[in-house]
Image (tube, grey):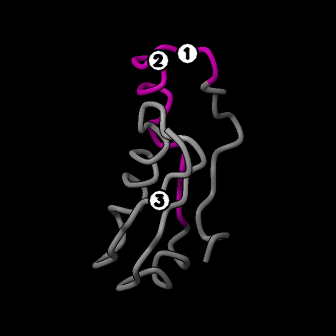
Amino acid sequence: IFLSVYTKQYKTRQVGLTNEERSRNKKNIFFISTSDSIILENKKILIVDDVYTTGATIEAMRDALKKISSCSVMVFVLAR
């Protein structure tokens, strides 16, 4: 299932950016193909992030997953 979520190749590195810049960069960086969306319907999904700084990565992933019907999303972060 992990391979069902893709990132765009042109994404900007977040290191050294302000919170506002990070928030702008998170728009549409993740996408899920239509066929993979069907697989993820009605599933429980766990997002694991290594570091929580601004929450931009988690929000971007949430935005991509919102398009899937009836999935439940939980988040686990290793460090803050």
Percent of width and height locating residue 35: 54, 79
Percent of width and height locating residue 42: 35, 85
Crowd band around label 1 with a 10 angstrom C-alpha radius: few (<14), some (14–19), many (20+) = few
Which secondary structure, mark 1?
loop
Crowd band around label 3 with a 10 angstrom C-alpha radius: few (<14), some (14–19), many (20+) = few
On the image, which quarter does residue 56 sit in?
top left
- Read off the residue under disc 1: 17
What range is drawn magenta here?
15-32
Spatial CA distance of label 3 from label 2 is: 24 Å
Q: Earlier in the sequence, mark 3 or mark 2?
A: 2
**Which tag is nearer the camera, tag 3 or tag 2?**
3
In the image, residue 51 sits, relative to residue 61, either above or below, namely above
**Which tag is nearer the camera, tag 3 or tag 1?**
3
- Read off the residue under disc 3: 76
- Name the quarter where the N terminus is drawn: bottom right
Q: Is residue 70 left or right of residue 10?
A: left
Going by the numbered disc 2, the residue's amino acid type is Glu
Disc 3 to disc 2: CB gap under 8 Å: no
In the image, residue 72 sits, relative to residue 16, either above or below, namely below
- Read off the residue under disc 2: 21
Residue depicted at 47% across the width and 43% down the height: 28
Going by the numbered disc 3, the residue's amino acid type is Phe
Which secondary structure, mark 2?
helix
